[in-house]
Image (cartoon, grey):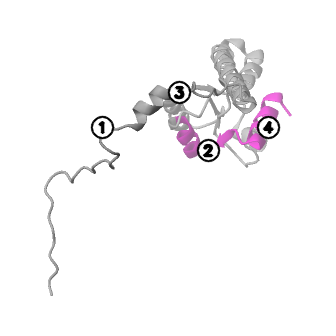
Amino acid sequence: MDSVLHLLGIARKAGRLEVGEEPVGGAARSRQAKLIVVASDAAENSVRRAARFAQGGKSAWVRVPYAKGELGAAVGRSACAMLALTDAGLASALAKKLAAGDPLTFGPAAEALAVEAQRTLQRQKEKRAHEKKLQRGRRKPWAAPPPESPEARKKRSRPPDGKGSQPPKRPGPRGIVTVKKKTP
């Protein structure tokens, strides 16, 4: 089996692959699709839809040199015209494998996906480091407030008017208050 088709099978097992026009469209609209793959013998309408999905979802799309039957066999279906990879690393690896065979056709997509995969990897590393930092408790240590002087404590305990301690008044209701009378 070809290494590109093998990588598609791995992506399916990992749950990072959408198969068919409707799931691909949903992944593209939610901007989860990183690379949309179209079979070589797909209908022109499917190719136009894939291009529109990619444009709307700001993702890359490629037309691979595999027939619908070959793509379908790689992902466990009888035939498949359109796929979407939702993982940036897998999409970059697939585009790199395609670019190794035909650099003029697949080279620009491979470069763009490699940059995106690097950014995603950097964000994941930063997130893991932040989570580890929180787990280890590397926050500023808690410090008790400074002790209060006896004079400050006396001022705080006496009310400002000099009278004995009285509970504070509760504020009355705001706006119009209506009272319902009970009818016998």
The tag earlier along the polypeptide, 1 or 3, is: 3
Q: Which mark is residue 148?
A: 3
Q: What residue type is labelled 1?
A: Gly
Say if residue 6 shows up in the picture: yes
Label 1: state its secondary structure. Answer: loop
User: Mark 2 and 1 residues: CB-CB less than 8 Å, in contact?
Assistant: no
Side of 62 relative to 167 (left or right)? right
Tell me the mark number nearer the camera, choosing from 1 and 4.
1
**Which residue in the protein does label 1 denote?**
162
Say if residue 65 shows up in the picture: no
Mark 2 neighbour density, 10 Å: few (under 14) some (14–19) many (20 or more): some
Q: Distance between the residues labelled 3 and 4?
A: 65 Å
Q: What residue type is labelled 3?
A: Glu
* Residue 88 included in the magenta stretch of the image: no
User: Mark 3 and 4 residues: CB-CB less than 8 Å, in contact?
Assistant: no
Quadrant where the image shows the C terminus: bottom left
Q: Which amino acid does label 4 sit on?
A: Ile
Main secondary-structure element of the magenta-colored stretch = helix
Label 3: state its secondary structure. Answer: loop
Mark 3 neighbour density, 10 Å: few (under 14) some (14–19) many (20 or more): few
**Which residue in the protein does label 4 denote?**
10
